Image: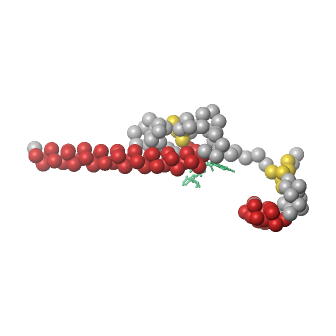
Amino acid sequence: MTVYTSILHINRPEFIEEHFPTINRRCLDLGIDMSREPIPVVPAAHYTCGGVMINQDGQSDISGLYAIGETSCSGLHGANRMASNSLLECVVFAHAASEAIRQSLAAIEYAWANCLNGMRAA
Ligand SMILES: Cc1cc2nc3c(=O)[nH]c(=O)nc-3n(C[C@H](O)[C@H](O)[C@H](O)COP(=O)(O)OP(=O)(O)OC[C@H]3O[C@@H](n4cnc5c(N)ncnc54)[C@H](O)[C@@H]3O)c2cc1C
C-alpha cells in the first residue's frame, strides 16, 4: 500500500516554490511535481531515544568518554523526544562537554606540572 501526502489544495505553484524550494526540487528530480500530484511517503525514524547515559556535562560513567546528540541519553527528552529540541540539545551539550573537557585538561596539566616539580625537587 502506498501512502501519499498532498499540497494540491494550494493551487499556486509559486507558493510551493517559495515555501518548499528544496523539497520541491528534490521531488522534481524524482519525477514528482507536487503542484500537480500527491507525493508518496514512507515511514522513517525521526529521532532515537536512548544511547549512552550522560550527565549534564555530556560525560558518561567511563572516565574520559563523552557523548552528545543522538548517540547520548541525556534524560532531557524523557521517554519521548520533545519536539524540535534535538538540535538545541546537540549545541547545549556540545558546549557543556567542551567546557568540562577543557577544565579536566587544565586539571591534568596542573597535576602533571606539580608531579614534574616534585620529581625535580626530589
Ligand atoms: C527527517 C528528520 C527531521 C528532523 N527534524 C528536526 C527538527 O526540526 N528539529 C530538531 O531539533 N531535530 C530534528 N531532527 C533530529 C535531529 O536532526 C537529530 O537529532 C540531530 O541531527 C542529531 O545530531 P547528531 O550530531 O547526534 O547526529 P547526526 O546529525 O546523525 O550526525 C552524525 C554524523 O556522524 C557521521 N558518522 C556516522 N558514522 C560514522 C563513522 N563511523 N565515522 C565517521 N562519521 C560517522 C554521520 O555521517 C553524520 O554526519 C530531525 C531528524 C530527522 C531524521
Q: Position of residue 118 (x, y in %)?
A: 15, 44
Q: Name the residue rendered at 40%, 45% in the picture.
A: 100
Residue 48 showing in the rendered view:
yes
Q: Position of residue 80 (x, y in %)?
A: 65, 36
- The figure's colour scheme reads secondary structure
Q: Name the residue rendered at 25%, 44% in the picture.
A: 111
Query: Is residue 44 shown left or right of residue 5?
Result: left
Residue 30 showing in the rendered view:
no
Name the image quarter holding residue 79: top right
In this view, the residue in front, 115 or 8, is 8
How many marks do you count on the picture? Answer: 0
Query: Is residue 96 shown left or right of residue 117?
Result: right
- Note whether 13 is above or below 3 in the view shown: below
Of all residues, the one furthest to the left in this rendering is: 122
Name the image quarter holding residue 31: bottom right
Q: Position of residue 35 (x, y in %)?
A: 86, 62
Query: Is residue 114 shown left or right of residue 43?
Result: left
Q: Position of residue 11 (x, y in %)?
A: 88, 60
In this view, the residue in front, 92 or 66, is 92
Query: Is residue 20 shown left or right of residue 6?
Result: left
Q: Name the residue rendered at 78%, 63% in the picture.
A: 24
Task: Locate the C terminus by quadrant.
Answer: top left
Q: Name the residue rendered at 81%, 51% in the picture.
A: 41
